[in-house]
Image: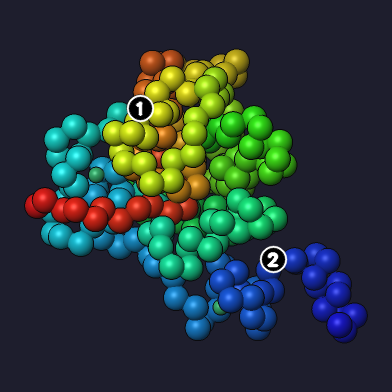
Amino acid sequence: MKAARVISELFYPSGIKCIICGDDLPEKTRYCVCSRCNLSFNTKFCLKCGRAMKNMADYCDFCQNEGFTFDMARAPFVYENEIVGLVRKLKFGAGKYLGEIMAQFMADVFYENNMSADVITFVPLMKSRERKRGYNQSEVIASALSAILDIPEASLLKRVKNTSTFARMGRRERAEAVKGAFALSDEKLIKGSRVLLIDDVFTTGATAEECSRVLKEGGCGKIFVLTFATSRIRIELY
Ligand SMILES: [Zn+2]
Ligand SMILES: [Zn+2]
């Protein structure tokens, strides 16, 4: 390895390689993605929950009927293909540096959707999991977003109940599993303040919903949910 590369690696360990394929980038780009790699951008989505849809309806079936407590959820990407790998890397592959790049994509979505917030918070992780991982990936993204958007960050929520892993659970099962899992932390939630809630992935929305419910009960105003990726609605009724 050349000396210049060694120095560059020291100071920009994430900035000079494509975050998807790992190829060298000719220069540091905004998103650190090379021209050959495609990302699954979320372009057609439910106007409320932000989940990807294929049909022409404005709202998904769930939002047309029951609906969520939060005001709006958005994500730059659909949780499929290379995006799955990126999220796994952030969580399990010592890819903490990816949080900053993810935050950049999410900041753009924040502006594009005219979101606004007085405070940024994040979905708390189970303590045992956070200890094992060494960090909470959602907090990492929230901190980076706080710096980009210049909005203060506060850990408004705490986890008061451990939940089993969600894989393969449907929306109702997840909603049941996550019920009572969160409570307001000791950090003061200013009444009426607009909250930007950060998580890595929006799947059925059960976690975002439960967090939103607690925040609303705590007296917050509007709640915007921003995740790096969101799910694709598979069964569309409209
Ligand atoms: Zn690439
Ligand atoms: Zn929806």
State which quadrant residue 101 falls in.
Answer: bottom right
SS for callout 2? loop
Q: At label 1, which amino acid type do we have?
A: Glu
Q: Residue 15: x, y in percent?
A: 68, 68
Q: Distance between the residues labelled 2 and 1?
A: 39 Å
Q: Look at mark 2 in the image and give the residue it sits on.
A: 14
Q: At label 2, which amino acid type do we have?
A: Ser
For ligand 1, give the image quadrant.
bottom right
State which quadrant residue 139 falls in.
Answer: top right
User: Which coloring applies here?
Assistant: rainbow
SS for callout 1? helix
Q: Residue 47: x, y in percent?
A: 24, 48
Quadrant for the N terminus in the image: bottom right
Q: How many numbered circles does the render carry?
A: 2
- Residue shown at 39%/67% (left/top)? 40
**54 w.r.t. 211: above or below:** below
- Residue shown at 51%/82% (left/top)? 35
Left of 216 or right of it: where is 4?
right
Q: For the residue carrying disc 2, how many other residues have a C-alpha within 10 Å: few (<14), some (14-19), or many (20+)? A: some
Q: Look at mark 1 in the image and give the residue it sits on.
A: 176
Is 82 in front, or is 151? Answer: 82
